[in-house]
Image (cartoon, grey):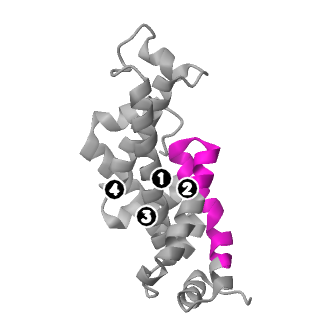
Amino acid sequence: MLQLNDSQLAALWSQGDSKAFNRLLELYKDKIYRLAYRMLRNKSDSEDVVQETFLRAYLHSHRFDTTKNFSSWIFSIGKNVTIDVLRKKKSELSMDTNPNPFQDSLPFYEKLTSQEKTPELQLIELETAAQVERMIQDLPDKYKNLIVYKYYLDMSLEDISKEVNLPVSTIKTRLFRGRNYIKRKWGSLFFLVQSLTSVIIF
């Protein structure tokens, strides 16, 4: 297949070209994996997210608007799948842990710095990841995708520039304003969440 960009591949896929879909899968599977792993911190769960994301994309190909950006569409599906997994894991862990993991014999700070992933610590990390997701979803659209590209997917400013067709200077400004928006909106909670675990993306 000739060197086609994402939009061209997506257009071919929407017309039934399975090779185009396979190419899109190769291009985005690692990015979706990183997106999931940032929040789940679990290799197996993240791999499941990749499979489920592309399954949903394949089954709902008719919903993709070929005039829109494919990456935004597939990342949106990936985020939704990851959130579903987060909710399921939180529910499962909640049934196996102290109803209030902040009040027991082990100090809170020691929980966070312990190398052992106890059910309580796993639940704290999942709650933290869920809070980060709420912060991201609350962002204005002009900041949201850039935050995801930079901090979820570890994309360089140059790669983001190519993806969204904006100058690097504009991207830097919007990333800065996006972070400030979160700080203003969430106040001290932002700094608490930022300090908790390695799941944080800022």
Q: Is residue 45 left or right of residue 136?
A: right
CA distance for labels 4 and 2 = 19 Å
**Circle 1 — which element?**
helix
Residue 185 rendering spot, x and y as whole percentages: 25, 46
Q: Nearer the viewer, residue 154 or 90?
A: 90
CA distance for labels 2 and 3 = 19 Å
**Circle 2 — which element?**
helix
Mark toward the start of the polypeptide (3 vs 1): 1
Q: Which residue is mark 4?
A: 137
Q: Which residue is mark 3?
A: 145
CA distance for labels 3 and 1 = 16 Å
Main SS, magenta region, reads helix
Packing grade of label 4 (10 A; few <14, some 14-19, many >=20) is few
Which mark, residue 49? 2
Q: Which residue is mark 1?
A: 82
Q: Is residue 57 left or right of residue 130?
A: right
Packing grade of label 2 (10 A; few <14, some 14-19, many >=20) is many
| Mark toward the viewer: 3 or 4 | 4
